[in-house]
Image: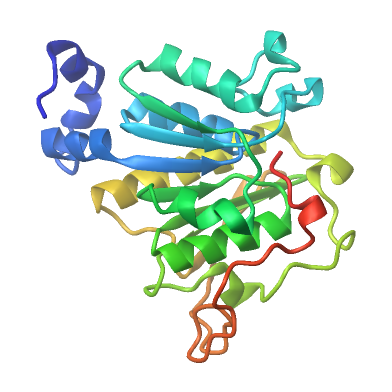
Amino acid sequence: MEFTDAQITRYSRHILLPEVGGKGQKKIAKARVLIVGAGGLGAPAALYLAAAGIGTIGLIDHDVVDLSNLQRQVIHHTSDVGRPKVLSAKEKIQALNPDVEVILHEERLIAANALDIVCSYDVILDGVDNFPAKFLINDACYMAGKPLAHGGILRFEGRVFTIIPKRSACYRCIFRQPPPPGLVASCQEAGVLGVLAGIIGTIQASEALKLVLGIGQPLTDRLLDFDARRTAFREVKVARNPACPLCGDQPTITALIDHEPEICTIR
């Protein structure tokens, strides 16, 4: 593919980077990234990946924009309240960069459709806010062999963790299974500092770009924690668990399952 003069100007600051250049920008233009959840984490990630020139961005979310979302879900505007999040997000992405193709999955991610959706993308971003969905995304990415940039936020704290199947620890290596319903509060119950979503979501976008370009050191085998109250990052080393039920030496999870499907929502 060849870039037009306008595209060369648009992506010039990338092209000037020796680690990216014209070849790297073409990799970005050919890449397909799926963002699961068009909410707090997915919003900044989608905007920055679109600005970077990711060729295809997939958005999966079955929810509609609520007034309470606007405190952190910056891709949505007041006029979008009541509209499907994927439609609202697509409009903002294409207004920012018409080069980007946006594929909408206006549905809930469940065991029955997860592999079919995940398999058609190169990199997956986890932007959901509940544990059952996070475990499902982790398992689907492992089975499909797709790298995953996990993100999570609650109150004043956020976390990023990148997973490359069969090369690094997976989510279940650290957290074996979802906690019982009600044990851990959600953002809806405990609150979240809105700007935290932007910090963690853009780190996830950075991880996706590094994976697409094949540069730098992804956050594999490392949990990156951020405390907004202290403006402090902390890195926790992790390792593949040989007893992991998914990627361990004797796996017991060989098919996707829905944990508590009635609460496995994407917000």
- Tell me if 236 is positioned left or right of 110 in this view: left
Residue drawn at x 29%, y 40% is 31
**Dividing the picture into quarters, in which one does residue 2 lie?**
top left
One can see residue 235 in this view: no
**Dividing the picture into quarters, in which one does residue 50 lie?**
top left
Count the marks: how many? 0
Q: Position of residue 85 (x, y in %)?
A: 64, 26
Which color scheme is applied? rainbow
As rendered, which of 96 and 234 lies closer to the eye?
A: 96
Q: Position of residue 69 (x, y in %)?
A: 74, 27
As rendered, which of 30 and 151 lies closer to the eye?
A: 30
Residue drawn at x 69%, y 18% is 83
One can see residue 119 in this view: yes
Residue lying furthest left: 2
Residue drawn at x 68%, y 29% is 72
Residue lying furthest top: 79
Q: Position of residue 25 (x, y in %)?
A: 20, 34
Which quarter shows the C terminus?
A: top right
Q: Position of residue 66 (x, y in %)?
A: 78, 23
Which quarter shows the N terminus?
A: top left
- Tell me if 195 is positioned left or right of 224 in this view: right
- Tell me if 138 is positioned left or right of 163 in this view: right
- 166 versus 243 height, above or below: above
As rendered, which of 59 and 72 lies closer to the eye?
A: 59
- 157 versus 96 height, above or below: below
**Dividing the picture into quarters, in which one does residue 164 lie?**
bottom left
- Tell me if 216 is positioned left or right of 172 in this view: left
Residue lying furthest front: 112
